[in-house]
Image (spheres, coloured by chain):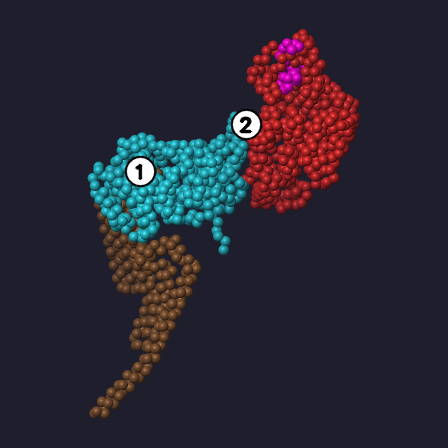
Amino acid sequence: MAEESFLADDFLRQLMSVGEVDLLVGIPSHNHASTLLQALHCVEETLRQNFVRERAVILNVDGGSTDDTRKLFIESSERRDVAHKGLTSLRTIHRISVEYDRSPSQGLALHHIVAAADLLRARACAVVSPGTTNLTSNWVANLLRPVYREGLDFVAPLYARSRFQGLLARDLLYPMSRAVFGQRIRELYSDEWGFSGRLATQCLEKEVWQEETMRARPEAWMAITAIGGGLKCGQYFLGPKPASPAGTSPDLVDAIRQTVGNLFWCMEINEPQWLNRSSSQPVPTFGPDHELSSDGVPASPEKIFDLFRSGVNELEPILASILAPETHAQIKAIALSDRLKFHFAAELWVKTLYEFAASYHHSVLNRDHLVQALVPLYRGRLYSFLLEHANSSPEVMETRSEMVCQEFERQKPYLVERWTTKH
Amino acid sequence: MPQLLDESLWYKDAVIYQLHVRTFCDSNGDGIGDFRGLTTKLDYLQELGINAIWLLPFYPSPLRDDGYDIADYTSVHPSYGTLQDFKDFLTAAHNRRIRVITEMVVNHTSDQHPWFQEARSSRDNPKRDWYVWSDTDTRYQDVRIIFVDTEMSNWAWDPISKAYYWHRFFGHQPDLNYDNPAVRQAMWEVMKFWLDIGVDGFRLDAVPYLIEREGTSCENLPETHEIIREFRQRIDLAYPGKMLLAEANQWPADVRAYFGNGDEFHMAFHFPLMPRMFMAVKLEDRKPIIEILEQTPQIPPNCQWCIFLRNHDELTLEMVTSVERDYMYDEYAGDKAMRINLGIRRRLAPMMENDRRRVELLTGLLLSMPGTPIIYYGDEIGMGDNVYLGDRNGVRTPMQWNGGWNAGFSTADPERLYSPLISNPVYGYQAINVDSQRRSAHSLLSWTKSVIQTRNAFRVFSRGSIEFLNPSNHRVLAYVRRLGEEKVLVVNNLSNSAQAVELNLQMYKRHIPIEMFGRNLFPRIGDLPYLLTLGPYQFYWFRLRRI
Amino acid sequence: MKELVIQGLRQAYDNLVHMFAEFLPRLLVMLVIIVVGLFVAYFLKTILRALLHVTRLDRLSEEAGASRFLRMAALPSMTELLSRSLFWVTWSGFILIGISVLGVAGLQEQISRLFLLLPAIFVAILILFLGLVTANFLSRAALLAAVNAGYPAPKLLSWSIRFVIWALAISMALEQVGVARQTVIAAFSIVFGAFMFGLAIAFGLGGRELAREFLERNLGDKKKEKYEEPQPL
């Protein structure tokens, strides 16, 4: 019996009309009527100014918007250049819009984008989010150019952040992925990135698209697939990471479920790739490696500590099934310490994470529950960080981050041992 | 002289063949084409299917600008024959129902023209004011230079009268002063001379530049239009049915003014469309064509655009953006020897890399888009060029009639020819010539004849409206030409690969498309989008019949 | 007298021999049925195992998440579980048939009743198993959600959910096998109702503040966050 194709007929027809392209820019959307046009015009400007002769298509993949998002995309027209008697770009900048599902899923959106990239034989692709309010045409160009002109296969963004922004990425996702997969890509989980058609084809062939963990955060998997396939990765400095408008960003629990859950799953399915790898390598970086600005400490961090302490307490049986007894004991001990003298050492943090990863692998309990059980511990680590670095300069914080990365790499044999042996 | 039928809008239905008498056929063995020789080739032109000839300047001239530097407006250069030879040619052409359009270089003369000789002789000469003089070269400061490769300034110093004279083209081509009524009258007398002989129309060369005013670009000024209207009024009164064609290399919106309210030029060249046709084929995208036509304004019902692929000049890239110009240079003129004056001095076939399919596609576009088409001599057989001949002479080589002595152009010694023949193995006269192509029903020549014949059989091409279909596949350019109940669907694949296209032909539901070359029926148009597939560079012309 | 006794004994001996003579064949038949049943059950188990390997049931089960539950319950893989279940069911059937051949009075009736009850018992076991797993899963999910959201008394919530599901599962299982149906249903209704009533009072009176905060947080002005957590990504 013929397998069902996930590509709708209308989408396929639109792809047929476009034909082969050199560049493809995907814009996943869901109720982005207020910001979509701005993103679209940024992309068009990039193509008009930086890729004048290239054949390009802008692909809007929509997850069941209930506002006018799709309509705006379809009906907007290319900006005219008044200086040249109203002529626009040299080539047609194609636009395609497809509704991939009735509810948003980054994984499904990406599936459609890589399918389009493969069918249209695009050389370089980028994904940009209309939710990124400070998106500029330079950002898009900086994601496409290294792929199109320098031959990279995956380009992650780099951002300028405020001191206390993105700690989940800086204190967990980056150092852990760096230690495990061996490449120093800072922003594996982001809203915009670039990739090659070659990588798109490889990703399309994998049978992971129906996985629950791919729904929200597929981009890291893409990078890890590139690493595993021996393809070239890099990163490009874009600018300040925008702060999400209130109520729009995922809360901490969702963020951890989506990212850490995805990271553990990537470790699971790419096991042969990283088990024997022992060190990490820098990747080609364009622009500054990253930047931290000196912004203030968030208000009321005490609540964070309370949540950590209550979490350790209430989740004791769960944590006992995940962690090694010594690790668990150490965590219980620090949970009892005075809040002003609290310190969650990097060594303990790394050990904890590796034990979580190994327990995930051994399915000691439901995997989503396992990842959720990490939340209070992350809060403890976060609180420790805030306490320690309330007045630290960005340089000091950066030095400390590098030490954490090295701790992850140093303890990697422990991860391998926990992973390969059922306790 | 036999009277041709007074079809006052004949120019709308014309298929014009552009040639220089010097290039076509030499009858007296001096190595230079002449009118007698041209007359012997009228049968060929009639067989080709064209019905108008546009002759490049054949007047007495020092020939420093290929005849556009005129030294005597009312005679024929002795190399090309005599005035009687011309009259005989004209009669023979009219006998074959072929009209003749000649050049009227109104903007400037040669510095050897008696008018200028007089004007420069002294500041008090009555003809002094027939040209534009200045004691300094600072007037009209911001006016652009047209021949950027050779001229540094629009002013030239005359050592005889110790003053500067104005020239928008070469320095040896001083501009006439149209603010002087005497100049206008003189030019009218020139026109009358030729109209009395029986010429059917004039291509007015360089019309935007007739008038100069300080603080302006000295192009397209209102006074220019007054002058044109005056000429037109006189012609309409005394010589009805004659045609004026404007050479105004401007954006369509600016050329529009030259049609006036139907009381200025009958026709004008659509310069900006031409490079975009070449661009569209290279880009494999109809966008450049659609965009420029969307910007093209409506013109009075008795007027017509003139469209062309190539001509005696460089393929001009003045009316494109810098991005487009760079693209065209890179794609069509990679060798810098091919470039001159913001243009490309190459012929059609070499630009198409001798790809017969592309040549046919572009010719098909030329003959099916709205406007009167002009075919440049030699393009019907796919003649090549010689970019090393200097100026634009590379596209003005002798016509290739056969594979024998001097390509059948002349009996003179080859060294005596006015220009060397194209003789390389690809485009040389041994490979590309009229005689060998006449022998094959499948040659480019035969094909061109049949396409012209098809076009001539349906007035919808020359007078019909155009509606673009804009299918989602941008590699396909599709449009419907319509005149009354006559409808023709034209579909062009601009790309090098096979294409599928779905056309929204709802408005023509229940019509039967009949392919116009093979006359085969295609499936009737129904409710669903009409699916067509086209091979690389293929095009269709369908008559849409409702039976 | 002596002769009567001897005759009696001889008679008894004859009866015994006769009984054995009648019983032994049946015993032999029973043993044959059981042995044949063993082979048949083993054969069917092997066939089913091979079939399930071909259809990759284990993989489907892994993807569906059922394998995890089995591992947690220290049960073998789905293929193995089903194969073994078929083995035991088949052989049990043959054993019961063999026993019924013995012709022991009363036993046949009980065996028939047991046969009739078997499906219900099977379903009841399944309900209990599912109930156990579901209770485990949902209570843990509730615990984690409550802890991470900072709600007070997360363990209470978790235990409440576990209790409700257990009670439901046990009631359903007992009802399935027909054990004191009416009593069980009534008892469940009373206990469940009382529990919910108690929760309502506890949360309604004691949890007024909590309810208010909950409503405010979800339906009211979202700016009234209790604290600010730095943007994690």
Q: Which residues are magenta?
A: B159-186
Q: Which residue is denoted by mark 1 in the rendering?
A: A403
Q: Is residue B255 left or right of residue C39?
A: right
Assess disc 1: are there few (<14), some (14-19) or many (≥20) residues with their C-alpha within 10 Å of its C-alpha: some
Residue at the spot 62% in from the left edge and 24% down from the top edge: B248
Colour in which chain C is drawn: brown
Under mark 1, the amino acid is Met
Under mark 2, the amino acid is Ser
**Element on which disc 2 rests:** helix
Residue at the spot 32% in from the left edge and 37% down from the top edge: A402
User: Can residue C157 be seen from the camera position used here?
Assistant: no
- Judging from the image, mark 2 belongs to the subunit labelled B
The chain letter of the cyan chain reads A
Q: Which residue is denoted by mark 2 in the rendering?
A: B322
- Judging from the image, mark 1 belongs to the subunit labelled A
Assess disc 2: are there few (<14), some (14-19) or many (≥20) residues with their C-alpha within 10 Å of its C-alpha: few
Residue at the spot 59% in from the left edge and 40% down from the top edge: B496
* Residue B107 x %, y %: 65, 19
Residue A225 quadrant: top left
Colour in which chain B is drawn: red
* Residue C43 x %, y %: 40, 67
Total marks placed: 2
Give the CA separation, mark 1 to mark 2. Answer: 53 Å
Residue A69 quadrant: top left
